[in-house]
Image: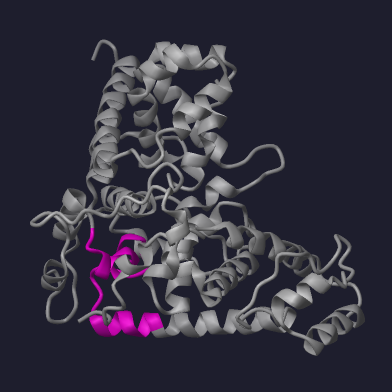
């Protein structure tokens, strides 16, 4: 079978005893609907080809059993081609692990804390690249004399490359975010798991020249660490997720990438619920920045931890594009990263997710490409809370409070169903506005 089952992932979802007030709705396994271990194994042929169409349908009905969630995610995120064999995927896995080890060694040469089992939360250099002899760093990393040697070596290198300076400046911010990420969970009581999360984010910041690291990425990466035992496999799963989302984090100096999606969110709300849109505009929220967190970290704060994972896999199954793997493999890492769905390639419609099929049939695409379902999820939440927002929100603080109050109370499947319905309704209205006499 494809990969050995790791320790049941559900055990990692436990809340620490002192944090029992934190919402933690357990993933509810639905017999006959959830993609079970047996159904997952039966979806492969003897050679290893995966029937992705039936798999997507099962996930859309009831999510994925926690014990196989990690390896299923690898397919949903485009790490592997369903049309590949067991042997081909194992070759790819080993090649990627070697690539990750090479990058990690490169980073370790620049900063020896990488791979040491520790991480830092204090800066090690100034903006000009000069060493900061901070005892906190030495205490955090337990490098002792080696830490002093590092600072001496850093000082002796002369002017540092601009890319190296930027990367070293990022490391302590990653550490601060790691220290705050999912700390209510038992899994992160172990420092080595925090260190693994820091290592992966540090490596990603090094190889992604355009975006690097931004706040919120730790929330996206954390589940990968928990679900995939091998650090390199977790990295590649996160890297594939970032292929879809990295545009949200891109900062041009004049705007952040997510602002384009907020603009689309405003247009959708204006068409679907013009009174709510007008009310939000009057409150000064016409830019919809109050919804930025939902899109940036994919509802990690609006849903309980378990339900957020359930939501993610349902979204990915709905959006699944069978050309994703080949699109992501070309060009390779040294070149420009590719985002979004493939264009101009024939697809087998029964191998696509339901949302992707709707876009293909209805041409529901903006100039920048198909809108992600997450935008319609936010619009669905706003629509659901329209009455409360209209009657109780007297300022943007009220809007944020009302949206924050839904934390732990949203149903992932219901939210996806609502988003799909809203998407259809939106496409119909847009079509009517564009072709009123057709």
The reply, left or right, for residue 28 in relation to residue 429 is left
- Residue 281 lies, with reference to residue 139, above or below; the image says above
Asked if one can make out residue 271 in the rendered structure from this viewpoint, the answer is: no
Whether the magenta-drawn stretch holds residue 72 is answered as yes
Q: Nearer the viewer, residue 153 or 45?
A: 153
Residue at x 31% of width, y 50% of height:
25
- Residue 287 lies, with reference to residue 155, above or below; the image says above
Q: Nearer the viewer, residue 158 or 427?
A: 158
* Residue 203: x %, y % from top left: 60, 71
- The segment highlighted magenta reads 64-93
Whether the magenta-drawn stretch holds residue 271 is answered as no
* Residue 188: x %, y % from top left: 49, 68
Asked if one can make out residue 413 in the rendered structure from this viewpoint, the answer is: yes
Classified by dominant secondary structure, the portion drawn in magenta counts as: helix
Quadrant location of the N terminus in the rendered image: bottom left
The reply, left or right, for residue 358 in relation to residue 266 is left
């Amino acid at each position: 079978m494809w990969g050995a089952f790791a320790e049941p992932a559900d055990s990692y979802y436990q809340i620490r005893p002192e944090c029992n007030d934190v919402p933690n709705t357990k993933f509810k396994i639905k017999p006959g609907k959830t993609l079970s271990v047996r159904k997952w194994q039966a979806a492969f042929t003897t050679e290893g080809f995966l029937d992705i169409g039936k798999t997507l349908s099962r996930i859309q009905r009831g999510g994925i059993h926690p014990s196989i969630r990690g390896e299923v995610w690898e397919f949903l995120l485009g790490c592997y081609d369903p049309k590949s064999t067991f042997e081909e995927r194992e070759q790819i896995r080993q090649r990627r692990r070697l690539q990750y080890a090479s990058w990690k060694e490169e980073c370790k040469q620049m900063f020896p804390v990488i791979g040491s089992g520790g991480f830092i939360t204090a800066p090690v250099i100034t903006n000009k690249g000069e060493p900061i002899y901070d005892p906190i760093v030495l205490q955090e990393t337990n490098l002792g004399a080696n830490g002093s040697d590092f600072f001496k070596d850093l000082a002796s290198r002369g002017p540092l490359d601009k890319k190296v300076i930027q990367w070293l400046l990022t490391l302590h911010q990653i550490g601060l975010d790691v220290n705050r990420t999912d700390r209510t969970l038992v899994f992160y009581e172990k420092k080595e798991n925090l260190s693994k999360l820091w290592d992966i984010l540090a490596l990603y910041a090094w190889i992604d020249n355009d975006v690097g690291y931004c706040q919120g990425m730790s929330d996206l990466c954390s589940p990968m660490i928990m679900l995939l035992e091998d650090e390199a496999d977790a990295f590649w799963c996160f890297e594939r997720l970032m292929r879809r989302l990295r545009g949200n984090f891109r900062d041009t100096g004049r705007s952040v990438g997510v602002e384009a999606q907020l603009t689309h969110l405003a247009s959708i709300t204006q068409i679907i619920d013009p009174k709510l849109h007008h009310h939000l505009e009057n409150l000064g929220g016409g830019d919809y920045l109050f919804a930025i967190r939902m899109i940036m970290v994919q509802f990690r704060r609006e849903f309980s931890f378990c339900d957020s994972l359930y939501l993610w896999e349902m979204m990915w199954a709905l959006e699944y594009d069978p050309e994703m793997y080949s699109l992501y493999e070309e060009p390779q890492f040294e070149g420009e990263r590719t985002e979004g769905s493939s264009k101009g390639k024939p697809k087998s419609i029964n191998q696509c997710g339901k949302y992707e099929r709707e876009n293909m049939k209805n041409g529901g695409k903006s100039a920048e490409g198909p809108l992600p379902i997450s935008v319609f999820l936010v619009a669905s939440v706003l629509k659901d809370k329209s009455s409360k927002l209209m009657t109780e929100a007297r300022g943007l603080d009220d809007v944020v409070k009302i949206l924050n109050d839904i934390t732990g109370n949203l149903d992932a499947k219901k939210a996806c169903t609502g988003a799909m319905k809203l998407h259809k309704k939106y496409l119909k209205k847009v079509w009517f506005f564009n072709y009123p006499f057709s």
